[in-house]
Image: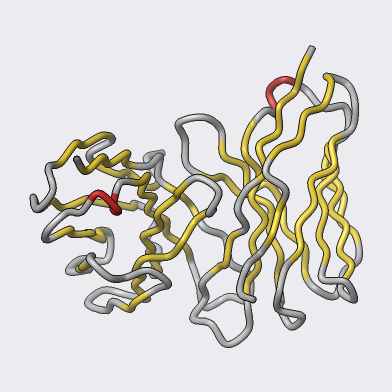
């Protein structure tokens, strides 16, 4: 039972470097999300996808890009990392189309930008 | 405002009841949720309540919803050390593309 898997778990970047975070889910969920978690601010939605080939902006999309080329994968890219992007990043997926919303989360990626 | 608000910290003794409170913003929210985050892990759904209900009980967990005041609470009976975690409330707002809005999280510390 893999569920939602995120890689890597930890990463340290220098300002200006780029990286991609990978999220994979094996539950055949249509919807996938990227959140960031910062102390005292809860979870904030970065981008989300309602299906393969689609993406949409969330609450805090600036500085990030995403792609959903395959239904099971959702990639989050940082083209030019900034210290303000130091955070814990969570991927989630859900079966929507129903009225209820149950998100399944990955275990997170801790990113530090120096 | 847009915020879903929670107090940041709660400490209780093992065996006591814990009550975690949340104030949400959208009176037309259809579902309200409680998620639990253990150290180093992602969030896991604990329970949820549909907006036409006032109360929902699930073993040691009781969810109370006051729609008039837009107030949600989670009561954990007989709190155990394994309940130590961060608890997030979340609302599913109408008119949004199936996204949840999360609160800031309440860290529950259970002492012996």
Q: Quadrant of the N terminus of chain B?
A: bottom right
The residue sitting at 75% across, 23% down in the picture is: B110
Position above or below: A49 against A8: below
Q: Position of residue B67 (x, y in %)?
A: 86, 73
The residue sitting at 30% across, 53% down in the picture is: A84
Which of the 4 image quarters holds residue B80? top right
- On the picture, is B37 further left or further right than B72? left
- On the picture, is A107 further left or further right than B83? left
Q: Position of residue A50 (x, y in %)?
A: 37, 76
* Furthest residue toward bottom: B95
The residue sitting at 70% across, 33% down in the picture is: B108
- On the picture, is A106 further left or further right than B37? left
Position above or below: A107 against A92: above
Which of the 4 image quarters holds residue B29? bottom right
The residue sitting at 24% across, 58% down in the picture is: A73
Q: Nearer the viewer, residue B5 or B73?
A: B5
* Furthest residue toward top: B112
Q: Position of residue B32 (x, y in %)?
A: 71, 65
């Amino acid at each position: 039972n893999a569920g939602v898997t995120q890689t890597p778990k930890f990463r340290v970047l220098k300002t200006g470097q780029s990286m991609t975070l990978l999220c994979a889910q094996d539950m055949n969920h249509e919807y996938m999300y990227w959140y960031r978690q910062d102390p005292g601010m809860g979870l904030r939605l970065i981008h989300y996808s309602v299906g393969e080939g689609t993406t949409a902006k969330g609450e805090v999309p600036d500085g990030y890009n995403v792609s959903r080329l395959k239904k099971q994968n959702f990639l989050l890219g940082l083209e030019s990392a900034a210290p303000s992007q130091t955070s814990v990043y969570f991927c989630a997926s859900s079966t929507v189309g129903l009225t209820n919303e149950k998100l399944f989360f990955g275990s997170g990626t801790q990113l530090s930008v120096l | 405002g847009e915020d879903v608000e929670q107090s940041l910290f709660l400490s209780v003794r093992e065996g006591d009841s814990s009550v975690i409170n949340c104030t949400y913003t959208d009176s037309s929210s259809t579902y309200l949720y409680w998620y639990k985050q253990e150290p180093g892990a992602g969030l896991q759904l604990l329970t949820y309540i549909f907006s036409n209900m006032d109360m929902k009980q699930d073993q040691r967990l009781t969810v109370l919803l006051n729609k008039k005041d837009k107030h949600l609470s989670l009561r954990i009976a007989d709190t155990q050390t394994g309940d130590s975690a961060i608890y997030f409330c979340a609302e599913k707002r109408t008119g949004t593309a199936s996204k949840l809005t999360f609160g800031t999280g309440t860290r529950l510390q259970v002492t012996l």
